[in-house]
Image (spheres, coloured by chain):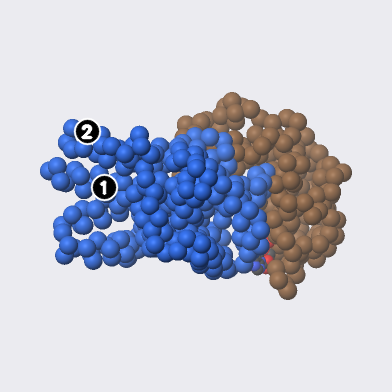
Chain colours: A blue, B brown
Amino acid sequence: MVNFLQHTFNGLVGGAFLALLALGLAVIFGMLRVVNFAHGAIYMLGAFGAYVLLTEVGLSFWWALLVMPIALALFGMALERLLVARLARLDPLYNFLLTFGLTLILQDAVKSRYGVQSSPYDAPAILSGTLDLGAFDFPAYRVFVLVMAVAVCVGVWWLLSRTRVGMVVRAATERPELSTALGIDVGRWVTPVFGFGIGLAGLAGVLAAPIRAVNPLMGADLIIVVFAVVVIGGLGSIFGSVAAGFAIGLVQAWVQALGEDWALLSQVLVFLVMAGVLLWRPAGLFGREEAPA
Amino acid sequence: MLRIDDLSAWYGEAQVLRGVSLEIAAGEVVTLCGRNGAGKTTLLRCVMGLHPGQRGTVELAGRTLSGQPAHRRARAGLGWVPDDRGCYATLTVAETLSLPPVVGPSPWSLEQVYDAFPHLHARRNAPSTTLSGGEQQMLALARVLRMGARLLLCDEPTEGLSPLLVAQVGDILRQAKQHGVAVLLVEQNLHFATTVADRHHLLAEGRVVESLENSEVAAREKDLLAYLGI
Ligand SMILES: Nc1ncnc2c1ncn2[C@@H]1O[C@H](COP(=O)(O)OP(=O)(O)O)[C@@H](O)[C@H]1O
Ligand SMILES: [Mg+2]
């Protein structure tokens, strides 16, 4: 029983990263119809940025947690203005290829400077211990990650569902042309929304630095799983991507807990689930069929 | 209020509007009739600024709208009532009403809207796409009245509505008219058109082929119905 709780906890922590990344992808896809392949590379930059800030500038984890998401959000906004926007009128495939190329550039740039081996990064001292929450001792840093991820997801949900800005973004996302005819300057929201999604990936990266191996390829494997998560949740569905992120994290941890023999299954499981979901509901669990234009 | 001059429009190579000109004064309701495919919806989309392949000029209250993006035209006072009623699955009825900015001098207040449309009040927290067809149409009209739009572009607002609801649409349009709102109304229902409109334009193959006063319509009803293919 204690074991099961422990695996469940680890699954939720793993799911927290999937959820944060999937949330950013979903927000971007909803508004721009761009599948941002570079999301994994941005996550890597968040983690590496934390490492570089600590070792070369002497800024602590807490500063990195503040600085990196903002810096990467600004980077994302510049990227949208300079490159993504130019391809927006073409087939979405062009922006997919653009962000794919960008991923390779970012990965190789980091690789050429810091090599492929993992760089050590410690959790801040105050979170290095464990928390006794009854059943077993929870590593304090992982509890922090989980709390942060849930808070961010709830915050984004609140922003989207309860504020005027969120309402405008929803309207612009669902029916851009109609919304412009009702006086909404849809174009004005594209750049900030893209930057926001990128900033979320950066945040996930900083959070990952103390518990995941920090290396140039850390985002490359993860992003494929995140794509599957987003498809399972329903492309562009905010709620769906977060729920699917936590759910896949949980299921992966449970299957891993079955033992070595199940390691392979836990890796391919997400894709099996995706295939099953697509057969059953082509638009994903919480997705809506695209209204014909 | 609205002046359209020599408006032409294309879908790729195919020309669908060929030099349409018309004017609408404040407080005037003008209908646009014509068979399916005549170009009525395209004309409204051109005025709204949603159709890229157009040439000609559109002016609202003396200000030129040509070349401006749709959101600017809406802010200049155009009220968009599209043929699909423009509802959102991700917005509630109340949100759909308050989405557009107030653009004109005499917008309806939310209380006025809910007084006039008690159904919308009852369903105010439901996603707007879950309303019935008639309620969606009322929502689309209520929304532009709440904006205080000065000219409404209404694309077949009575299509598929019961006689009771058609009458209600008529009431709303007459009420707007009394407040000086101008309306460009695309309408297939000739009888309804004569109860709300001052003048009528017949559109065929992208041209205005006839313009009639209200009184002329009754006299030539048979003719016109045959022409519309109804
Ligand atoms: N998206 C489109 N692409 C190409 N042709 C179109 C498109 N929409 C409408 N048309 C054509 O333009 C003409 C006018 O259409 P429309 O303005 O919708 O007519 P109406 O509203 O009077 O029924 C029709 O011949 C129609 O086939
Ligand atoms: Mg039409």
Determine if the C-beta at disc 1 is less than 8 A from ligand 1: no
Q: Position of residue B78 (x, y in %)?
A: 73, 44
> What quarter of the picture does the C terminus of chain A occupy?
bottom right
Residue drawn at the location 77% of the way across and 62% of the way down: B54
Q: Nearer the viewer, residue A23 or A127?
A: A127
Query: Same chain for marks 2 and 1?
Result: yes
Residue drawn at the location 34% of the way across and 49% of the way down: A211
Q: Which mark is residue A36?
A: none
Q: Chain of mark 2?
A: A
Q: Position of residue B206 (x, y in %)?
A: 76, 65
Q: Nearer the viewer, residue A116 or B204?
A: A116
Q: Nearer the viewer, residue A29 or B166?
A: A29
Above or below residue A55? Residue B39 is below
* Residue type (three-letter) at the residue carrying disc 2: Asp
Question: What residue does disc 1 label?
Answer: A10
* Residue type (three-letter) at the residue carrying disc 1: Asn
Above or below residue A130? Residue A229 is below
Query: Looking at the image, is mark 2 or mark 1 nearer the viewer?
Result: 2
Residue A156 in view here: no
Mark sitting earlier along the chain (2/1): 1
Residues packed near mark 1 inside 10 Å, few (<14), some (14 to 19) or many (20 plus): many
Mark 2 vs mark 1, CA separation in Å:
15 Å
Q: Which residue, as the protein is rendered here, is positioned at the far bottom?
A: B13
Residues packed near mark 2 inside 10 Å, few (<14), some (14 to 19) or many (20 plus): few
Question: Could you tell whether B51 is left or right of A293 in the image?
Answer: right
Residue drawn at the location 12% of the way across and 43% of the way down: A1
Q: Position of residue B113 (x, y in %)?
A: 60, 30
Question: What residue does disc 2 label?
Answer: A132
